[in-house]
Image: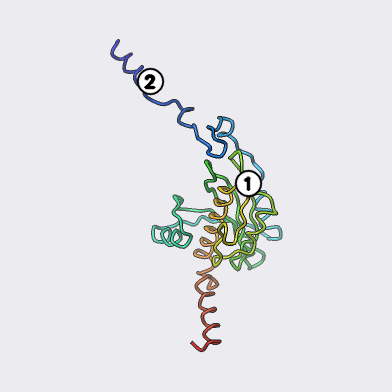
Amino acid sequence: MIIGLLSILAVLFVMPSPSRAERVWDSDLKRYLTDQEMNLATVYLQEEEGVKIMFPKSERIRKELITLNPEKKSLIEERIGWKFPEESFEVYIGESGAQIDGYAVVQNTIGKHKPMTYMVGVDNEGSVSNVELLVFRESRGSEVRKKRFNVQYEGKTVFDPVRIKRDITNITGATMSVRSMSAGVKRVLVLIDEFYLKPSGIGSDTMAKKDKGFFSSIFGN
């Protein structure tokens, strides 16, 4: 009986409490984040609201699940320059008549400590049409939801870097959020290119061949 009680007490003293395990140090604030900050979640848009913004004129919207086999996952990771754990993504597709208006994918990428949720819209030619922040879970960095910032993603394609100091202007004090959103936007562009545009003959491979042919005709190569 005594031995059993001592064993229980030993476990209690050795095992960290849930609150202690959740403690996260913020190097900017130079302190541990409070429980309130760690549990922070500001919802700016519900997913269905984001979908309506992405496809304001579409006659119908459907949703598909795309699954990445190991080869496809490795290819996409190589193209975007970073590895990710997800093996499947839900894609919203807006349609009018027989035409596809565009695509939208919800992304969850880590900001500074926790994931933020946002939706990336891509038109039927592979250019970013819109970006909307849905849920933000950090104490700082939510400025990425403002249109004066995320409008700079519009028009980006798989041929653009979509990176800070390259073609994306940073926000002071929100660098991790900007980097996270930029990475997610790039991933969506590559996903749509690989699963929808390339199979339709209008993907990056086709465009690269056209550009090569154009320059060859000019320079005679």
- Residue type at mark 2? Phe
- The front one of 220 and 10 is 220
Percent position (x, y) of residue 89?
51, 53
Residue at image x 61%, y 42%? Answer: 136
Q: Quadrant of residue 5?
A: top left
The residue beneath circle 1 is 134
Q: CA distance from mark 1 to mark 2?
A: 41 Å
Instruction: Give the number of the mark in front: 1 or 2.
Output: 2
Residue holding disc 2: 13
Q: Position of residue 51 (x, y in %)?
A: 65, 53
Q: Which mark is residue 106?
A: none
- How many numbered markers are drawn? 2
Helix, strand or loop status at disc 1: strand
Percent from the top left, x then y, of residue 154?
64, 61
Determine the image quadrant of residue 217: bottom right
What residue sits 53% from the left and 37% below the top? 26
| Quadrant location of the N terminus in the rendered image | top left
Which comes before the other along the chain, label 1 or label 2?
2
> What x and y, as percent, mark residue 178?
58, 51
Above or below, comparing residue 11 to residue 43 in the picture: above
Looking at the image, the residue that sits furthest to the top is 2
User: Helix or strand or loop: what does disc 2 sit on?
Assistant: helix
